[in-house]
Image: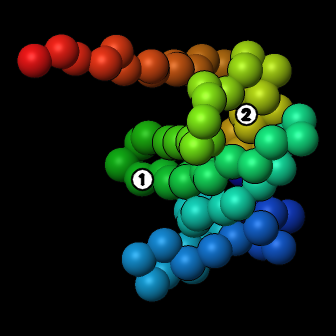
Amino acid sequence: MRNLKHLDPYRYPLMGHWGNSYNGAFKLKINGERYTVIASNGEGWEHVSISHHQMVPSWDTMNQLKDLFLKNMKRLCSCIHLRTTT
């Protein structure tokens, strides 16, 4: 995970915590749309979660997100969970 200090103006508290240089919650505008992003690292993992209230982010948006949060990553995994029916 890259140092996220450059995103401090977009940081907001999540469950009362502002995070630190490598973890936190952010409200970002990417490609004209507003997203909520949560970034965390620890125990060998780096995780970035993005959400939008109406749509799934585009591939271009995901690439911009990667550039903002993840530095020099050789491998990335993207998970999209399918809706389950009952």
Foreground label between 1 and 2: 2
x then y, percent, for residue 2: 72, 50
x then y, percent, for residue 79: 45, 20
Which residue: 34% across, 15% down? 82
In the picture, the disc for residue 85 is none
**83 lies left or right of 34:** left
> What is the secondary structure assignment of the residue under circle 2?
helix
One can see residue 76 in this view: yes
Q: Amino acid at mark 2?
A: Lys
Which residue bears the numbered disc 1? Answer: 42
Residue 13 versus residue 22 in the image, above or below:
below
Q: CA distance from mark 1 to mark 2?
A: 18 Å
Which residue bears the numbered disc 2? Answer: 66
**50 lies left or right of 30:** left
73 or 67, which is in the foreground?
67
21 or 12, which is in the foreground?
12
Give the crowd class for mark 1: few <14, some 14-19, many >=20 residues within 10 Å: few
Q: Earlier in the sequence, mark 1 or mark 2?
A: 1
Which residue: 70% across, 60% down? 27
**35 lies left or right of 54:** right
Q: Amino acid at mark 1?
A: Gly
